């Protein structure tokens, strides 16, 4: 199964693609979609760049599933609203490509990748590099996106084990 992770951002959105075979994870690609070339007041234009960029990544790498970080409410309500719109553009792009979208919090990502929910960005980067056997540290946005894909892989594997156990214990 191929999983695409998206770390939404209005200026820079990260993406990460992994292949999953049982418990084996393999790095495919990662990068960023940037809107920094546009005027910050051009919100519709920036959202279109994100939407088109995510669709382009989907077309190029043909994932089977996707995962996106859930936006947290921060101190600045305006920033939260803007980030929510960026996330909406990314999710809409995924859904328009008929991809299933799973959603995870930053806490879930950190627990799945680093083992505890208070892990910092640097720890997530290090663990993503280790888990995917990367030669160098991925950028922060790409690392978060790869972490979201890894989180979805772990959840999917756990669900498969649970489903198998339920099937085995069901009366025949």
Image (cartoon, rainbow, N blue to C red):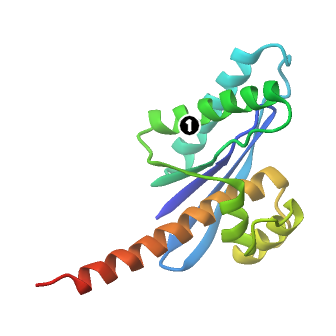
Residue drawn at point x = 59 percent, y = 74 percent: 25
Q: How many marks?
A: 1
Q: Residue at x 68, y 31 (%)?
A: 84
Residue 127: percent from the left, percent from the top?
A: 78, 73
Q: Residues within 10 Å of mark 1 (few under 14, many from 20)?
A: many
> In the picture, residue 43 is in which quadrant?
top right
Q: Quadrant of the C terminus?
A: bottom left
Q: Residue 54 at what x, y percent from top left?
A: 61, 38
Left-right relation of 142 to 89: right
Q: Is residue 57 left or right of residue 39?
A: left
Q: Which residue is mark 1?
A: 91
- Camera-side residue of 86 and 65: 86
Which residue is pictured at 72% across the width and 43% down the height?
72
Q: Quadrant of residue 55?
A: top right
Mark 1: secondary structure: helix
- Judge by depth and name the residue closer to the eye, 84 or 132: 84
Left or right: 172 as drawn, with respect to 125: left
Residue shown at the point (61%, 35%) measured from the top left: 90
Q: Position of residue 11 (x, y in %)?
A: 81, 32
**Is residue 83 positioned above or below 99 on the image?**
above
Residue 57 vertical placement versus 78 (above, below): below
Q: Is residue 161 left or right of residue 169?
A: right
Based on the displayed image, in which of its 4 quarters is residue 122 positioned? bottom right
Q: Identify which residue, 107 or 42, lies in the foreground.
A: 107
Residue lying at the far left of the rendered structure? 172
Residue 144 % position (x, y): 74, 56
């Amino acid at each position: 199964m191929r999983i695409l992770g998206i770390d939404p951002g209005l200026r820079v959105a990260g993406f990460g693609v992994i292949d999953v075979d049982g418990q084996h994870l393999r790095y495919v690609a990662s990068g960023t979609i940037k809107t920094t070339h546009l005027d910050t007041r051009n919100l519709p234009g920036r959202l279109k760049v994100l939407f088109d960029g995510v669709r382009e990544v989907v077309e190029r790498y043909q994932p089977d599933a996707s995962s996106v970080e859930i936006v947290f409410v921060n101190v600045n309500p305006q920033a939260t609203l803007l980030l929510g719109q960026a996330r909406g553009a990314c999710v809409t792009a995924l859904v328009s490509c008929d991809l299933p979208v799973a959603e995870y919090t930053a806490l879930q990502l950190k627990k799945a990748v680093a083992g505890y929910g208070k892990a910092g960005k640097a720890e997530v980067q290090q663990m993503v590099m280790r888990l995917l056997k990367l030669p160098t540290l991925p950028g922060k946005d790409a690392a978060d996106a790869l972490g979201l894909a890894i989180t979805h892989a772990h959840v999917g594997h756990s669900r498969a084990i649970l489903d198998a156990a339920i099937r085995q214990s069901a009366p025949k």
